Image (cartoon, helix red, strand yellow):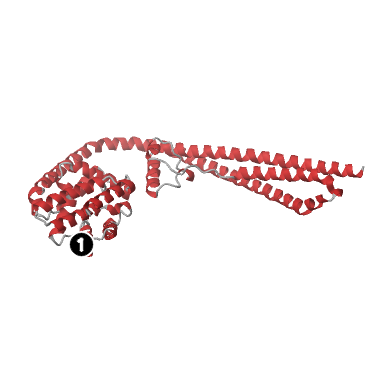
Amino acid sequence: MDILKISEDHVKNLFKDRLSSVYTYHNLDHTIQVVDKIKILAREEHVNAEDTEDLLLAGWFHDLGYIDDSENHEEESRKMAEEFLREHQLDEARIAKIGKLILATDKFYKPTDHLENIIKDADLYHLASDDYFNVCENLRQEIKEVHHQKFSKLQWAELNTAFFAKHQFYTKFAQENWQPIKQKNTEKIFDKIKNLKEDKKEKSSQDKDKALLNRKKLEKLESPERGIETMFRVTLNNHTKLSQIADSKANILLSVNAIIISVALSTLIPKLDGPSNSHLIIPTFVMIMSSVACIILAIMSTRPKVSSGTFTRKEIEEKKVNLLFFGNFYKMPMEEYLWAMKEMMADRQYLYDTMIKDLYYLGIVLNRKYKLLRLTYTVFTIGIIASVIAFVVAFRNVTM
């Protein structure tokens, strides 16, 4: 049994099937890179075959916990690795060692032995990568999407310099071969910070002029926006009250017609068996059928309609989704809904268009409710009149 190949296939399938697309850094590509660097370090550091296999297994599993828990992913990864390896009957001592290696990838952990030094250096190889800035940008986007923390380019560059200052490579091979590249990346970051600060100074004078103009615009917009918000609030309250009134009226008709049917079933129908009461069959049938029709129409007027409950990021970007109606998002994960709401709130036009659409569709629903309610009252009125006429005619024919 090739436990390494089985583990590789298992991890790749889980990443492809279950990992959210918001993880632009901690994903399968990062895991493959870590495994590749473990192979290099294990070879250059002269690690024996079993320890190399343990390192590679730890490398495959070390970020798998992100599919369930990004806050405590090392511990989740360890549990998932131990469960999987135990199912495949790996030695318990090796399972414990692999779990310890996975925990060693925590960014605050200080390695205590040679194997931990290797996996630690492999996990942070990207600091010495020629593609460092693209990888780093992926990490910034992931933090923004997952943890909802936004950093400007200048803030992010300054945070990276602080991390570089605290970081060190532990293995001899990494110190000799990766440290010089890391140093070059550090210098590039300082150059980037310098350029960003210069750009910031150049824009500061322009920003002051823009601020004055924006302040005047805001002063002009402030009063109309309050009026718009009041209009939305009052209109929404009116729509809600009208909907409640319609539902109340429908409930009244349901109750009244249910009582009529109950009385008819308990009082009139038992008497229709006798020949002397045969004249009551048609009036009773007219009364019961009109009540049944009223009940059906009243139920239709209050019957809710719910949509699919999902949306895509493309639909949000194209501003096609009304996020104010629960039927459009109730099946979505919380992270996706938070992202979508923030996107909408950041775009004033999208926000107002959504509020307008929400009022419009509420109006459509109200129109349907009141049309059915009007039809229900019409059927109820006609049914009562027809029933009374039918009973009068029936009794008159009997007496003649």
The local crowd at label 1, few if under 14, some if 14 to 19, many if 20 or more residues have their Cα within 10 Å, is some
Which element is circle 1 on?
Answer: helix
Residue at the location (58% across, 40% down)? 366
Whether residue 149 is visible, yes or no, is no
Q: Is residue 316 above or below residue 96?
A: above
Q: Position of residue 371 (x, y in %)?
A: 63, 38
Q: Position of residue 7 (x, y in %)?
A: 25, 52
Quadrant hosting residue 57: bottom left
Front in this rendered view, residue 188 or 111: 111
Q: Position of residue 342 (x, y in %)?
A: 38, 44
The residue most toward the right is: 400
Relative to 357, 98 lies left or right: left
Task: Check the picture and name the quadrant holding the C terminus.
Answer: top right
Residue at the location (21% across, 59% down)? 98
> Identity of the amino acid at label 1?
Arg
Whether residue 192 is visible, yes or no, is yes
Task: Check the picture and name the quadrant holding the N terminus.
Answer: bottom left
Relative to 52, 151 lies left or right: right
Q: Position of residue 287 (x, y in %)?
A: 76, 45
Residue where numbered disc 1 is placed = 94
Residue at the location (20% across, 45% down)? 157
Quadrant hosting residue 225: top left
